Each structure stands twice: as structure tokens, then as C-alpha cells.
Image (cartoon, helix red, strand yellow):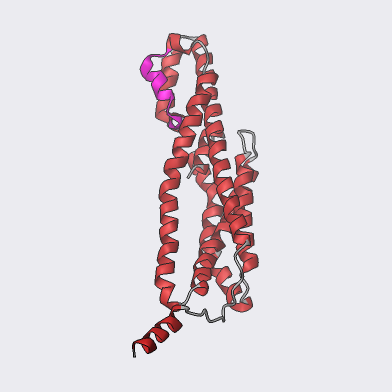
Amino acid sequence: MYYPIFLQGVKGISVMRSGQILTPFTVLMAFMGVPAGFILAKTKRYKWMYISGYGLLTASIFWIAFFDSETPVFFAVLAAALAGLGLGTIPTINTLVVQWAVPKRLLGASMGALFFSITIGTAIAPAVLGSVMNTIYAKKLETTLPSGLNQFADEATITALGDPKALLSPTAMKALEKTFAKEGFYGSDLFRQTVEAIRTSMEAGLKFVFLLGAMAMLISFLLILTVPEISMDAVIEDRETPNRASAGKSDE
């Protein structure tokens, strides 16, 4: 969600080129479930793939957290490809691991809990990370905006600068440029400084967002290391079955 904002806002890449950079991520994320399934069916071993998937995704997000406006586009494509490669295997293996870890009686409940957790995470994360980004952006912007801005820009313009998405809107930026152009050469220079301040503040906010995401993935990776590898052919004992049987005998 925030990677395209980084590409377009911080690096100044067009929407089309940003989509092209994200293409390897999307394709690999959708495709990797197929070979993962074939490998699992043939080898019946999944722990190495589990660790590799979470490890690649964690490393990719940590790498992205250190990107800046000078980062080569090739690195941006490579990071997206590695993230897609890692994330592509995770949904398939997560689902199978849950199915192998519980008796058939609990299969529906366990799958429901898995997808409920995923849904809650994807619903909460944008709100939390968005709030964090806006807070960091606003604090950084206060220290980076040029000192003479208040003399030339009205209150509405300054308020609009508080939204980091202003940098992503060509219409908003053209309107802002026209406002500064009325002041001649000094206004043009002030506009350039203002845009640079917005870009720097957005970069600071996104770095913090990526670091939070990377830390969350690191915790997930460490938890995955503790998951035992269960044989695909193993029969999980249902501990409640003997209890029910003994209860029935006692009633007789």
C-alpha cells in the first residue's frame, strides 16, 4: 500500500512506471502458490519453504526501509520481486500447516480463526500505519518548510501542505506553483524549497512505516522458527474423543 506512495512521492516516478515496478511483486505473489503446492506434494517437507518465505519478505521490507530518493530503480524492482517471491508461498503453506496441526473436527474453526486474523490485520494495519505516517510527516514538515513561506502563502495553502498526498496530485502541485509564481524568481525558489520539504517529510514518515512493518515481519519470522514440522501423513489425535467415550460408559 505504501510502496507506490514512496515511488511516486519520494522518487518522483510516474504512476505508470510505479505500476511496472510493482508488476514482479504482483505476478510472483499470485504465481508462487502453484510451484509451492507441487514441491510440497513431491517432497512432503514445508519448513524450509516456510522459513524462506517469511525470511525473504522480512529482509525485503527492512531493505525498503532504507530506500531514499537516490535509490536506483533496479533496487526498487528487485525488492518488489523478492517480496513477491517470499509472500507468494506464505498463504498456501499457512493454510496447509493449520490443516495438518488440528484434528478434522476442528478444521473449520481453525481455518476460520486463520482468515479472521488475516482480515483483522489487513483492516487495522492501514489505520495504524497511516496515523503514524501522518504524525511523523507533520512533525518533520514543521522543521523543513522554508521560513519565508508564511509571507507568501495563505492559510489554506499551508493547511493543504499538511497532507502528504499533495505531492502525489499534479493538480494540487500546479495550483501551488501558480501561487508562488506570482512572487517572481523568489517565489519559484520558495516553491522548489517547499516541494523538497514535503518530499523529505514524506520520506521520513514512510521510513518509519516501513520499519514498523519490518519489525512486525521479524516477529512473525521468529515465531515461524518455533513451528514444528508436522508430517503430512500424520494423524492428529483428537483428545476429546476418549473423554466422550469414557463419559458415555460412566453414564451407563
Task: Say above or below: 187 vs 101.
Answer: above
| Residue 229 sits above or below residue 57 on the image | below
- Residue sitting nearer the eye, 223 or 22: 223
Residue occupying the far bottom of the picture: 252
Image coordinates for residue 54, horizontal then vertical, percent: 60, 57
Outermost residue toward the left in this view? 251
Q: Is residue 81 visible?
A: no
Total marks in image: 0
**Residue 176 can be seen, yes or no:** yes
Residue shown at 45% from the left, 15% from the top: 180
**Secondary structure, magenta segment, majority class:** helix
- Residue 212, image x and y in percent? 55, 42
Q: For the magenta stretch, what is the residue range? A: 153-165
Q: Position of residue 29 (x, y in %)?
A: 53, 58
Task: Write the residue at 51% across / 15% down.
Answer: 190
Which residue appears at 44% of the width and 51% of the height?
Answer: 122
Residue at 51% x, 37% y is: 8
Q: Quadrant of the C terminus?
A: bottom left
Q: Position of residue 138 (x, y in %)?
A: 47, 26
Residue 48: name its quadrant. bottom right
Position of 176 compared to 30: left or right?
left
Q: Is residue 174 magenta?
A: no
Q: In screen coordinates, is 91 left or right of 156?
A: right
Q: Nearer the viewer, residue 175 or 164?
A: 164
